[in-house]
Amino acid sequence: MDVRRALEIYEDKSHTIEVKLEGQPVWIENVDEVNGMATVQVGSRPTNTETVNVERLQEG
């Protein structure tokens, strides 16, 4: 995924768009456009977050 698409998904509050990190469902919590990074929540625990390169994220 590219930064632009990650930001679109993050900003779209009207739809739930499935995003995965290495096959695991994640929620995008924040997107750092300058560095191409995203903070994601892994699974259903709000405290389980990771900051990863957006290229590691897959839609659908």
Image (cartoon, rainbow, N blue to C red):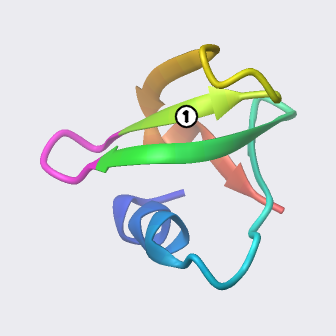
* Residue 38 part of the magenta segment: no
Q: Residue at x 44, y 72 (%)?
A: 11
Q: Mark 1 highlights which residue?
A: 40
Instruction: Choose top left, top right, bottom left or bottom right for residue 22.
Output: top right
Q: Residues within 10 Å of mark 1 (few under 14, many from 20)?
A: many
Instruction: Choose top left, top right, bottom left or bottom right for residue 2.
Output: bottom left
Nearer-the-camera pick, 6 or 2: 6
Going by the numbered disc 1, the residue's amino acid type is: Val
The segment highlighted magenta reads 32-37
Q: Residue at x 65, y 85 (%)?
A: 14
29 over 2 or under it: above or below: above
Residue 4, image x, y percentages: 36, 70
50 over 41 or under it: above or below: above
Q: Residue at x 84, y 31 (%)?
A: 24
On-image quarter of the N terminus: bottom right
22 over 60 or under it: above or below: above
Nearer-the-camera pick, 10 or 55: 10
Residue 52 left/right relative to 45: left
Residue 52, image x, y percentages: 46, 27
On-image quarter of the C terminus: bottom right
Residue 34, image x, y percentages: 12, 48
Nearer-the-camera pick, 8 or 57: 8
49 over 41 or under it: above or below: above
Which residue is the extreme one toward the left?
34
Magenta span: chief secondary structure = loop
- Secondary structure under tag 1 reads strand
Which residue is the extreme one toward the bottom?
14
Q: Residue at x 60, y 15 (%)?
A: 47
Report how many numbered discs are placed on residues in the image. 1
Instruction: Choose top left, top right, bottom left or bottom right for residue 59.
Output: bottom right
